[in-house]
Image: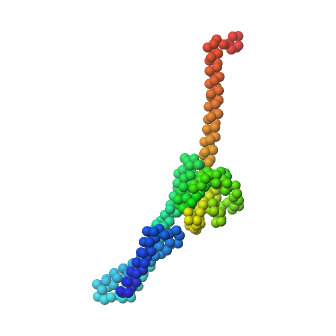
Amino acid sequence: MVGRFLGGMAITLIALGITTSLLRYRLYDADRAISRSVAFGALTLALLAVFAGSEKIIEVLGEEYFGESLGALAGGIGAAIAAVMIAPLHHRVTHWAEHRFQGALIKLRTGLPLLVGDMRETATPTHLAEVLLDRVESGVRASRGAIVIDSKVAAAKGIAVDAVQEWLGAWVVSSQVSALDCDRTDTLFPLRAPLYADGVGMVGWLLLGGRPDGSFYGKDERVTIATISEPTARALAIALQRAAREAARAEEIGALRGEIGDLRAIVARLGSHRRAGFRPAAEGA
């Protein structure tokens, strides 16, 4: 019993030491792998605690009510209780680990579709593109980024617009517009996400530079970027359509104002002629 307790304590101290170093020094650039490792370690500790606690309680109850130690039966019941607790503990621990180590990425994946859904009816396409780019860069920790619509830079961060336009002039667009275009040899924009949505078509591209340390995006980051591309494209398309309608309406209003101005000028001239004693020929007859 003492050996088992010391073994459990040793495992607990090792896991706590690793977790403390991760939390203190933020040594989790490989967020996905470390998140799963921490979740596995925490789940193991929790199951050990449940097993040991259940076994001890059952032994105490056995001695209290039956006057003898239940021995192996207590261990079996403790193991059964731990087995029942695996699923709920796994869900809770995994949820905690993901939000602790991949919080920005999860916020991007779940929050961005809601954000663009709210902004697409009121924001201008340029403002929407700037907000989208800011959220994406924060979520995946990109060193630079740009959103391109109709071969024009709608927003850029961490890089000059002229530099993006120059890069676009030399870029050969992938024929598979529905998939991420990844080129790790490209030092400027190694990841290009097509902003495409069913029923809308191709709206533009989300261009992302590598991370500040030069590393490329992991699987979770790429999946998240692919996931948010569709709602982003749809929101930008709606904002562009609304902006086009507003521009056409403003043009019509401008034309009407011009016609009204011409009519006012004609009326003013007629009024001045009347005041000068001018009468049209029909009135003189």
* Quadrant, the C terminus: top right
The foreground one among 218 and 86 is: 218
The foreground one among 62 and 178 is: 178
Q: Residue 282 placed where, x, y %?
A: 70, 14
Q: Residue 237 placed where, x, y %?
A: 62, 51
The foreground one among 135 and 213 is: 213
Q: Hey, which quadrant is residue 246 in on the image?
A: top right
Residue, x 64% and y 25% (percent of image)?
A: 263
Would you say residue 124 is visible in this rendering? yes
Residue, x 43% and y 68% (percent of image)?
A: 24
Q: Would residue 70 be found to the left or right of residue 259 on screen?
A: left
Residue, x 52% and y 63% (percent of image)?
A: 105
Q: Residue 14 placed where, x, y %?
A: 43, 78
* Quadrant, the N terminus: bottom left
Applied colour scheme: rainbow
Q: Residue 283 placed where, x, y %?
A: 68, 12
In the displayed structure, 265 sits above or below 40; it is: above
Seen as rendered, the residue at the extreme top is 285
Q: How many marks?
A: 0
Would you say residue 81 is visible in this rendering? no
Q: Would residue 72 be found to the left or right of residue 168 on screen?
A: left
Residue, x 63% and y 24% (percent of image)?
A: 265
